[in-house]
Image: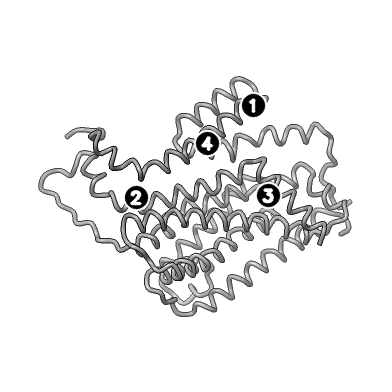
Amino acid sequence: MHYGYHIEIDEIGAWLPLLLPILILHLILFSVALVDLLKRDQSTDYKWLWGAVIILVNIIGPILYFVLGRRQRSDAPTSSKSTPKKVRKS
Amino acid sequence: MNRFTVLLQKEWLDAKRSYKLLWLPVVFMFLGILQPLSSFYLPEILKMAGGLPDGITITLPELTASEVLASALTDQFDQLGLIVIVMATMGIIASDKNNGMLAFILTRNTTLVEYLLSKLVGHAVMIAGSIFLGFLTAVFYTFYLYQAVSVARIAAGLGVYYIWCLFMLTFVIAIGALLSRTPAIALLSIFVLIFLKTITLLEGGFQILNPAHLSNQAVSIITSGNVLPHFFITMTVSVLLIVFCLIFATSYLSRKELPSM
């Protein structure tokens, strides 16, 4: 019984055309998420944490960042800009 | 409808800024690739991962091309895809409510109906594009690895499936109008939608009233070219439920959010 994958080099050649789209899509998500994280003004802790998530969690990491990680900033400026708060009935 | 186009442009800009326009199609393309590839290479993947212990043999079912496409729809799009759609749309009303944008927009010259319709149309177009792209990649892979399937069937199946997606979207919008916390919205809508999806496994007469049954109809259209019985009743019920969700969201928001509207 052994663990891990055994792929010969010439087998990779046969698989490559099929796997290439996945790699390209992953690279797009990964780089856009990382560039966006680096451009953001957030604390260093925050950047390290989300950077680790983006890099280490395949495919789902960047998406988690887009869904959850970006919300803090988009909430922060609007609350400080004193936009009118929710108008309630009387 | 000039104000409506302005609101639509706002939706478009919002989708671009939040990168929703990028990641939603990409996720569906991943899901589309995953199913044909994994079902085609399953024997080799098993062999590479160490193989089966001696003496155990399993026979994998021979899948036809249309079955692979259908399972891409039910296994990938209906589970991960459903969660992704809910995650992409859970904040669309709630975030506007919470940061005061909803009240701000409605003090302008717009009506609630225009606002909700702009949300609906913007996201419906985005979801349609994502599902189309995702299924297109699945079709390419299936055609390459297996053999061709009738394109008319695929288009018809996808069209039927899209009505179910539209129901998911309007349901999330209705829940979003009702609640104001995003995690609660996501949890509740994922729970209800997956519940609806799960009870389609049970046989029973009430299935014809279940919008999730449309994905089974889509599978049947793709694999056999025929619809299951009571197709038009399910279709009508789903469209009525979509309209009902929208009316509910409009009336609830107009009663709750604004003093006079």
Look at the image and tell me in which quarter the C terminus of chain B lies. bottom right
What is the CA distance from the residue labelled 4 to the residue labelled 2? 23 Å
> Considering only vertical position in the picture, is B31 above or below A59?
below
Q: Looking at the image, is mark 2 or mark 3 nearer the viewer?
A: 2
Could you tell me residue B223's position as x and y percent?
37, 69
Q: Which residue is mark 3?
A: B92
> Considering only vertical position in the picture, is B242 above or below B95?
below
What is the CA distance from the residue labelled 1 to the residue labelled 3? 24 Å
Residue type, label 2: Leu
* Chain to which the residue tagged by mark 2 belongs: B
Label 4 in the same subunit as label 2: no
What is the CA distance from the residue labelled 1 to the residue labelled 4? 15 Å
Residue type, label 1: Lys
> Considering only vertical position in the picture, is A26 above or below B86?
above
Q: Which residue is mark 1?
A: A39
Name the N-terminal-most of marks 2 and 3: 2
- B256 and B136: which is toward the camera: B136
Residue type, label 3: Ile
Label for residue B37? 2
Quadrant assignment, res A47: top right
Label 2 in the same subunit as label 3: yes
Residue depicted at 72% across the width and 66% down the height: B247
Q: Secondary structure at mark 4?
A: helix
